[in-house]
Amino acid sequence: MGMTIGKKPELLAPAGNLEKLKFAIHYGADAVYIGGKQFGLRAKAGNFSFEDMEEGVAFANKYGAKVYVAANIIAHNENLEGAHEYFKKLYDIGIAAVIVADPALISACRESAPNLEVHISTQASIANWRTVQFWKNQGIPRVVLAREVSLEEIKEMKEKVDIEIEAFVHGAMCISYSGRCVLSNHMTARDANRGGCAQSCRWNYDLFEDGTDGSVSISDRADEAYTMSSKDLSMVEHLPDLIHAGVDSLKIEGRMKSIHYVATVVNVYRKIIDTYFEDPANYQLDPEWVDEIWKAAQRSLTTAFYYNEPTEKDQLFGKPDRITKYDFAGLVLEYDEATQIATIQQRNSFKVGDEIEFFGPNFYHFKQTIKEIWNEHGEKMDIAKHPMMITKVKVDQPVRYYDMMRKSK
Amino acid sequence: MNTSYRPELVATARDLKEVKVLAEAGADAILVGHQKYGLRVTGDFGLEDIEQAVLFLHGLNKKIYVVTNAIFHNQDLIDLPHYFERLVELKVDGIVCGDPSVFPILDEMGKFIPVFWNPETLSTNFETLKFWQKQGIQRAILSNELALDAIFEIKQELELPIEIQIHGMTCIFQSKRKLVSNYYHHIEDVNNQEKYDRDKKLHLKEPKKEDTNYPVFEDFNGTHIMSNEDLCMIEHLEPLIDKRIDSLRINGILQSRSYNEAIVKLYREAIDLCMSDLYQYKSFQFLNRVRESLGAIKSEERKLGTGFYFKEQIY
Ligand code: SF4
């Protein structure tokens, strides 16, 4: 490590399952957060059994990385059962911290696993320094802030309270204060605060003004539905600002996102953090990092509340921006230097003539055209269309195990 | 068994006039506040108004609570200690809070004022409320998204008084963003300075559901979307009283004065009857009369319902 100014923040990545955990860490995350089978909000995010967690922790340990478990539901009475055993088990497995929103689960964790760190989730909407101080007084070492706070506000929190602050740098966002939206409960009888969110905020509504002679549909008049979707957060162009504000952990959203997404986003932020700390005075944004982020983007991007209160420009109105989407086409398993042939496990169909891009940790990447493909038995093929099939591909530059091959959709 | 049980009927008021009307209509306690400190208050009370309301209500031996449960940002904290000091001096009977910042602030002030806990969607189980009890709260106000069984279990497990909403709209969404202005700015004119507040009477309809009506408005705390149905538990008071729920709240937000007055009167009568003569309360005559009265005062667009009290949710 060279000379650094200030403390290097942690890069914290989502991992919806064991494979994503491995990619996130291999691509440079200092820590990952996962969900278990209980108490987590992402009911559909795959989620880890205790065995998976054990394997994940063992893998993380090899890299010196940490594993956190999100237990961020707002529990009802009947959900409390088993919490004590659960936290005790997490501690025994070697989980570094749990991310909790409901004080009931803080109490359970305190009692059954007093040495397991508790971080307060963004679901608790922590938006001011006194609330941060409250949690500090409760012995909480880290808070995840509400997405509604600005950089100025974070700075003040850090000045006034000695506590670790975790803040989102990238990903999709609730348009509501987290935890304060029960649209899904009302519209679909699914409890958003226990993982049942139906993304009702992203639906098209009709807005009416109630006048003296009845209701008038504004949406009809404007010929555009009423929507509330936010663009996705990205601080890729402004990371040093978060570092200067004193953020201790930079969090990427997306336990439901693909391996390609996680690896790409982690890779970019890792590169930015490392570049910055190598030489803070001469740091400059490389447009390539931004290009790379767009390869994983699913919506247009915004800096949300960090600089100003978001306006209509930070919402997804009108026709969506065109974004080229990419598929994870193949995973490099082996590389033979002598023949320049890579063994690739197919993840999405690719064929001879495709323009593809290889990329790997440390922001390594290059583009090429696929010239030849062979199957396991050395027979030539035009197309690799079977999921997970093993192929051989001639590559223009060296690749390594865990490098990925992407192609535009 | 505590034989002196009598549920408290709490109602929200938009101004001094409504404080008086609703107190006389039979409310035992009135909720007031200002949007700068409280979420979805029905009208904005300055400190002088609060002082007047305290004098009036205390004269009638009734209570006044001040809503201060906004999700505060650093900037909002600056006046907060002063505001709390004044509320203590004015002898309000409690403040309704939902942001943990109030605990260190009140600690430093070193003065006592009863804190009622209402973080809206987050008061969902008894262990959570026991945690806040340790921080000193004097009353637990439960989330609206609970089934009655869950409420009764909380009542059983918790030594604190509990309060639930029994009538009116409930909030189902709060964003810090100006989600109505943003839409108008997008479709019409970026420079339009219009206020899309409570008086503007806007509502949303769900896609392909013609009969839905979700009121929406903006204020100091952002954008609020309210429920499609008005909660109405007037026919289901028996189990609430049987289980000795301490406080029953009527939320009068976005309703007319005459409606609120009539509703408070109706609940006063129903509660008293349910306590004194259960047989009469459950009689067809009484229920018919209640339904007729409700039919006469309720607006056409608003449906009445029982919210989540008898409904199961999946997740
Ligand atoms: S509906 Fe939207 S704002 Fe509400 S919880 Fe779901 S994603 Fe968040």
Image (cartoon, coloured by chain):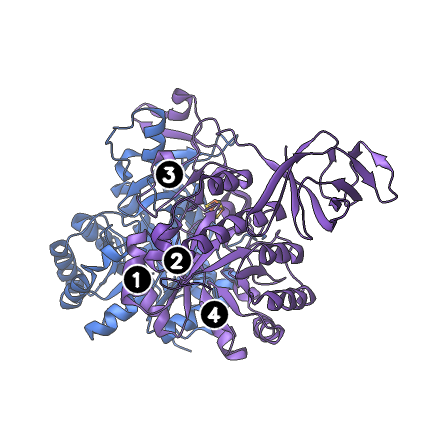
Chain colours: A purple, B blue
Q: CA distance from mark 4 to mark 3?
A: 38 Å
Q: Are marks 2 and 3 on the same chain?
A: no
Which of the chains bears the disc numbered 1?
A: A
Between B250 and A85, the residue placed more toward the observer is A85
- Is B157 placed left or right of B171 in the picture? right
Between A163 and B45, the residue placed more toward the observer is A163
The residue that disc 4 covers is A118
- Place residue B79 in its image quadrant: bottom left
Which numbered mark, 3 or 1, is in the foreground of this view?
1
The image shows residue A339 at horizontal and vertical percentages of 77, 45
Q: Residues within 10 Å of mark 2 (few under 14, many from 20)?
A: many
Q: Residue at x 57, y 72 (%)?
A: A87
The residue that disc 3 covers is B215
Q: Amino acid at mark 2?
A: Leu
- Place residue B94 in its image quadrant: bottom left
> Element under label 4?
strand
Please tell me which of labels 1 and 4 falls first in the chain: 4
Q: CA distance from mark 1 to mark 4?
A: 19 Å
Please tell me which of labels 1 and 2 falls first in the chain: 2
The residue that disc 2 covers is A145
- Is A162 placed left or right of B46 in the picture? right
The image shows residue A93 at horizontal and vertical percentages of 62, 73
Between A283 and A332, the residue placed more toward the observer is A283
The residue that disc 1 covers is A157
Which of the chains bears the disc numbered 4?
A: A
> Element under label 1?
helix
Q: CA distance from mark 1 to mark 2?
A: 10 Å
